Image: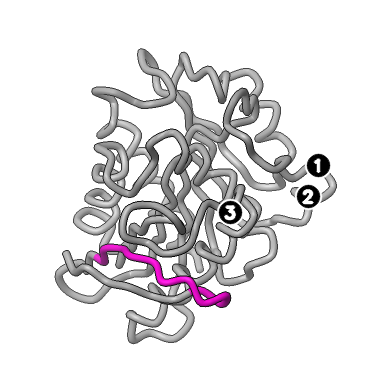
């Protein structure tokens, strides 16, 4: 693991950690964390499990980072809008660390991070596949910009995975499946016996994301 820093287009310095697999990497993954105002950061067992799976089992270069205003990252909370710049800078930074030009790239987001990830991916052609964990289709108290609607999502022809716990209050399975149907190429996965935080099911969720990455990035 290598501690790293990088800068957004509006001059905000962000902190992160980069993990590089042994041997040649097959691609890149960037992981976006939950809501900064609800204790979210890159340092959570679920995100550790996802990063470990993607680097150790799927041979991806993986960047986890803190959004602006979180821990050692500069700036202040941007309401889920300025954080698009953070995700964009993270994708560019991670891709630059791979010798292969235009490496296959997976963008992963959990909760608030999933909301940022789906909105960034719509306009960022560098993203080849998208994994949305606990996407808050029922936002509740999370203070998020609206999610893209069917008109926007129908243009996103790249593979997407929507995954949530069986008892997720922000991503109830039926509502998540309905939202997933708006994508041209999406699959929905529900992890039994857990909720939005995936306690004791972190590895199950990580393995499903890893298997998706294997399928989604290989054909490129």
Camera-side mark, 1 or 3 = 3
Circle on res. 192: none
Please state which of residues 11 and 88 is positioned toward the viewer in this rendering.
11
Which residue is tagged 1?
150
In the displayed structure, 42 sits above or below 30; it is: above
Please state which of residues 2 and 160 is positioned toward the viewer in this rendering.
2
Point 44% across, 76% down: residue:
7
Which residue is tagged 2?
154
In the rendered image, residue 181 lying in the magenta stretch gets the answer no
Magenta stretch: give its range: 8-18
Point 69% across, 32% down: residue:
179
Which residue is tagged 3?
78
- Helix, strand or loop under label 1: helix
- Helix, strand or loop under label 3: loop
In the displayed structure, 125 sits above or below 70; it is: below
Work out how far the residue at label 1 is from the one at label 3, CA to CA, in angstroms.
25 Å
Work out how far the residue at label 1 is from the one at label 2, CA to CA, in angstroms.
6 Å
Residue 30 is situated, as x and y percent measured from the top left of the image, at: 41, 60
Residue 177 is situated, as x and y percent measured from the top left of the image, at: 63, 26
Earlier residue among tags 1 and 3: 3
Q: Is 215 on the left or on the right of 56, as rendered? A: right
Point 38% across, 73% down: residue:
94
Tag 1 near tag 2, CB within 8 Å = yes
Work out how far the residue at label 3 is from the one at label 2, CA to CA, in angstroms.
27 Å
């Amino acid at each position: 693991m290598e501690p790293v820093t990088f800068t957004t287009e509006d001059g905000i310095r962000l902190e992160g950690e980069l993990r590089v697999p042994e041997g040649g990497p097959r691609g890149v993954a960037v992981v976006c964390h939950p809501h900064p105002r609800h204790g979210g950061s890159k340092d959570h067992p679920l995100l550790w499990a996802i990063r470990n799976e993607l680097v150790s089992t799927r041979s991806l270069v993986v960047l986890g980072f803190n959004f602006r205003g979180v821990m050692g990252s500069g700036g202040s909370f941007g309401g889920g809008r300025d954080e698009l710049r953070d995700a964009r800078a993270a994708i560019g930074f991670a891709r630059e660390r791979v010798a292969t030009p235009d490496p296959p790239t997976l963008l992963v987001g959990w909760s608030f991070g999933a909301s940022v990830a789906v909105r960034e991916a719509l306009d960022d052609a560098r993203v080849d596949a998208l994994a949305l964990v606990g996407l808050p289709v029922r936002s509740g108290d999370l203070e998020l910009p609206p999610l893209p609607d069917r008109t926007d999502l129908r243009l996103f022809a790249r593979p997407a995975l929507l995954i949530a716990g069986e008892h997720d209050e922000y991503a109830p399975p039926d509502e998540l499946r309905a939202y997933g149907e708006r994508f041209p190429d999406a699959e929905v996965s529900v992890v039994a016996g857990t909720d939005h935080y995936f306690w004791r099911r972190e590895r199950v969720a990580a393995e499903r994301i890893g298997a998706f990455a294997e399928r989604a990035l290989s054909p490129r």
